[in-house]
Image: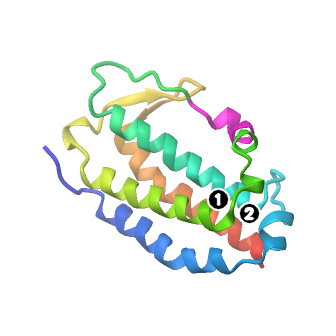
Amino acid sequence: MQGNDFKLITDGIKKVIDAEQGFLSALPVDVITLRRNSQNRSIKQILGHLVDSASNNHQRMVRLQYCKDLLFFPDYRQDNDLWIALQDYQNADWENLIQLWKFFNLHIIQVINSIDLSKLDSYWCDFEGTKVTLKEMIDGYLDHLHLHIREIKELAL
């Protein structure tokens, strides 16, 4: 059974992409590289973190639809800063990073639109042992995106 019980979420992701791509592209180099949040991340690094989030959630969303038992998939939350450093988002080409963020999120929309609704209770455990269902993961994705876009906007002002 497939369907789109997540239209508000997928429409919301698309609205964020449409609203923010131009804003992100227009940010000056000094703003995206020098201003830091409370975690000492630049705007480039925050956008890179959103790419990591899309990448990891994409894998979980797909795997949870065919995994027969509990999904064993590493959680990266405790290693966010390591992921950011190893991929060197701080020195990445800004336009390429924006495009990667955009197209990964467009693909997330496709994945969510194609979710097998009979698998929504499938779950994986995060690094703290908390069970996270496929439905909970999808439901929380847009909020996480909004959280970090707001953070970027606050740093940009």
Q: Amino acid at mark 2?
A: Ile
Magenta includes 123? Answer: no
> Which one is nearer the viewer's eye here, 118 or 114?
114
Looking at the image, which residue is at 83% across and 61% down?
36
Q: Is residue 82 above or below residue 142?
A: above
- Describe the colour scheme in one phrase: rainbow
Which element type, helix, strand or loop, lies under badge 1?
helix
Could you tell me residue 3's position as x and y percent?
A: 18, 53
Residue farthest to the top, as pictured: 69
Q: Quadrant of residue 80?
A: top right
Looking at the image, which residue is at 79% across and 72% down?
29
| Residues shaded magenta | 75-83
- Give the Cα distance between marks 2 and 1: 6 Å
Q: Which residue is mark 1?
A: 47
Could you tell me residue 127's position as x and y percent?
A: 59, 26
Q: Quadrant of residue 106?
A: bottom left
